[in-house]
Amino acid sequence: MSIFEDIHGEHGRSFGLRYYIVSLLAKKEMTGAMIIDEISRITLGYLKPSPGSIYPMLSILANSGYLKSRTQKGRKFYTLTSKARDRFSEMSVPPMAFLNRSSRNDSIEESIASIQYSIDYLLDNIDSLRKDRKSYQELLKITKQMQRML
């Protein structure tokens, strides 16, 4: 059984995303934000998975024993475990894949999870966020809206 069959079936909705993540992490340690950027780079901008698709898949792979992580300066870096490397055969990242790019949430729980994944992405990019005054101000505005809502 391959690493891809172990998690939601070989050709499930997230097969392409798993393929990219495992292929990239086989080469080097990366954060979720780095994975997003690298997928965008190698597909020449054709694909750019959202934090709401990358971070849940990283969690699934970690919970399945295929990834381990370490935190450095608030950023979480992922690597393949020996379990993943044992099951991982030589392969390269394809120029295109079928990533699930849906941002639709079907429940409050999924919406909350999506917010958490976005927070994880922002933490991975905190240095850039601090330099981008406009984005930082927009994030403050959203934070205040959420505080009023709660």
Image (tube, helix red, strand yellow):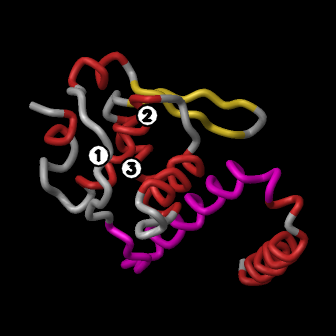
| Cα separation between marks 1 and 3 | 11 Å
Q: Is residue 110 above or below residue 62?
A: below
**Distance from label 3 to label 2 (Cα)?**
13 Å
Rendering coords of residue 31 (x, y %): 58, 41
Q: Secondary structure at mark 2?
A: helix
Q: Disc number at residue 41?
A: none
Three-letter amino acid code at disc 3? Met
Q: Dot 2: few (<14), some (14–19), or many (≥20) neighbours within 10 Å? A: some
Residue 71's spot in the image, x, y percent?
66, 31
Within-10-Å neighbours for mark 3: few <14, some 14–19, many 20+: some
- Which of discs 1 and 3 lies nearer the camera? The answer is 1
Does the magenta run of residues contain 108?
yes
Q: Residue at coordinates 34% horizontally, 16% vertically from top-left?
A: 82
Write down the quadrant of residue 96 in the picture: bottom left
Q: Quadrant of residue 91?
A: top left
As drawn, the label of residue 25 is 2
Q: Tell me the amino acid under the disc marked 1.
A: Tyr
x then y, percent, for residue 49: 45, 63
Q: In which quadrant of the rendered view does residue 118 lie?
A: bottom right
Circle 1 SS class: helix
Q: Nearer the viewer, mark 3 or mark 2?
A: 2
Q: Of label 3 and label 2, which has the lower sequence position? A: 2
Q: Residue furthest left?
A: 1
The residue lying at 86 percent from left, 76 percent from top is 134
Q: Is residue 37 left or right of residue 7?
A: right
Magenta-colored span: 100-128
Residue 55 at x, y percent in the picture: 48, 52
Position of 110 with respect to 84 (left or right) is right
Question: Considering only order in the chain, which callout, 3 or 1, is on the residue closer to the N terminus?
Answer: 1
The residue carrying mark 3 is 57
Q: Give the mark nearer the N terminus: 1 vs 2.
A: 1
